Each structure stands twice: as C-alpha cells, then as structure tokens.
Image (spheres, rainbow, N blue to C red):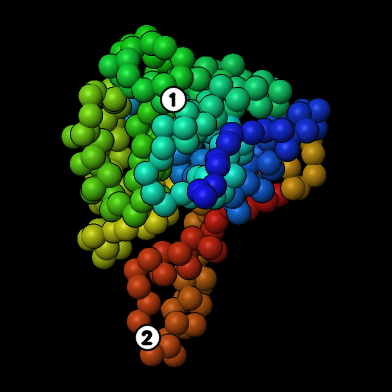
Amino acid sequence: MSKEFKYSIEHINLSDMNTKLDLFMKMQEHNEGKTLEDSRFVANLNKAIAAELGWDKDGQERAHETGLYYDAGMVGLEPDFINFDGKFTVEMRDEMHKHVEEGKKLLEQAGVEPYIIEASEYHHRDFDGGGYGKEAKEKDIPQLARILRVTDSIKGFDNRGFSPLEALDDVKNPKWGNPYDAEIIDAYEKVHNRVKEQLSEKGITEPSLPEFKIVLEETYKVEIEKDKNNDKNNTIKLDKQPKTKKSTKKVENAAAPKKQKESSYQKLKKESIKKDTQIK
C-alpha cells in the first residue's frame, strides 16, 4: 500500500514562532536544510531581477527578504513528500497546494512584513490567472509575486537537474498557458547573461546550476542582517568578501599535489566556502 502524504504544521508550536528568526531557524531545520537553501537561491534571484528592473537598494533588499520567507509553508510537508520521485496524484497535489494558505499563518505569527505575506499568497498564481493561491491576473498580481512566479520555477528546475540554459528556455517557452510576466522574464534573461559572462571569464562555458548559483551571489552581492540586538547566531550575513591574493595562492598550492584535476564547480565551491555565509 502506498504511503499517504498529508500537509500539516501541527508539529510546530506556534506560540514559539514569535520572530522572523524563529521562522528562519525552523526553515533551516527542515528537510536537512534544503528548504532554506532553496529560499536563499530564490532570494538571490529576486534581488538580481529587481536590480535589472531598476529598483533602488531598498527595493532590492525587500525582494531579497521576500525570497527568504515566501515559501515558509513548505515546513508543513515532510521530506519524503517534497522529494517524491514520481507523478503526484490529485490528492497529493491538493495537499501540496495547502502550503500557501498555511504558510501565511506562519508568516503572520512570526511578524513578517505585510509585503512578504502578500507576495507569498500570490506566488503560484500565473500571469494569465491560472495556477493556485489568491486569485488575480496580469498586473493585478503584485510585482514581487510576479517575480516569485519566475524565481520559484527556476528553483524547481534546479531541483530537477536542469542547466541554466534549459531553465531559461523553459520559462521563456512554457509548455502550458502564460504563467510568467514577460517583463520579469526579460529581466531574468539579463541576469542569466550577466552571470554567464562572469562564468565565461572563469573559463566555464557550459555551467551547471550549482555553478550558476555561486556566481549569481557573487555578481549581485547581498547582505542581510537579522535582529541586530541578539547574539552572533541571530545575524545572518550573506555578503561575499573580496579574496586576497594570499588566500588564492594557498588554494592553488593545496591543490597542486593532487593528481586528479579539480572540476570547475569544485574550484568555484572552494572559493565560495572561504567567502560564504558568515554568522556574526
């Protein structure tokens, strides 16, 4: 008999979910950290697209923070459900859809900003009015939600092993309806081309999405702080710091004795680890 998958946040004590930091940590615990990792990717994509749309710094930071929290409702789905390798039944799809409405409760309880909650409510609503979540169509859908409709899809392509070019092609040429705002797609294509140019300078002409994610964050630098009044574990900094020539030399010297040549992704990852998420 096949396993029955159900959506539930009953395991979460809402009385303990009083701040964004509480919610952030709950997302970090979920699905071995994958829920938060996915949200960080979406956050960086959001910021990059906002930059290409000409938003000011505050707008870009709002776009970034929205990406961190918009999918908080995913904590009500057990990992086996999220990582299910097969076609969803109608019942499974209905349960999956609950993460939008139930996620709103978590966001409200944690005191997340109203613009994030609003964007979360619409993030699965298609530009032509299809999809699910709060009803609207075209420009009546908040622009942050229209950005999320694209970036959430890119995240899904990453989880399915698509290349950056395949992901771009899929959102430009959707196989159903008209889910995306053309203005957002144009902005994402600019992001894609800018990151591709940076990768090309590193000698990577056919990047994987993991490589793309690393250089995306380096290209559109981001810095987010959480609750400055708390201890060092309550501040999450995602900004990339410049790497000195000295540190670069050490990486090269350490790699020299190895017989097996490092892949381009391994090199990027090694660089990223030295500059990656810092908690102050």
Residue position marked by numbered label 2 in the rendering = 260
Query: Which amino acid does the dot numbered 2 rest on?
Result: Gln
Q: Mark 1 or mark 2, which has the lower sequence index?
A: 1
How many badges with numbers are in the image?
2
Q: Position of residue 9 (x, y in %)?
A: 67, 33
Indicate the secondary structure of the residue bearing disc 1. loop
Classify residue 107 as left or right of residue 51.
Answer: right
Residue 194, numbered label? none
Q: What's the residue at 41%, 70% (across, down)? A: 266
User: 184 or 76: which is nearer to us?
Assistant: 76
User: 172 or 229: which is nearer to us?
Assistant: 172
Q: What's the residue at 49%, 60% (across, down)? A: 272
Classify residue 258 as left or right of residue 164.
Answer: right
Q: Callout 1: few (<14), some (14-19), or many (20+) C-alpha neighbours within 10 Å?
A: many
Q: What's the residue at 41%, 21% (across, down)? A: 132
Residue 123, numbered label? 1
Classify residue 97 as left or right of residue 212.
Answer: right
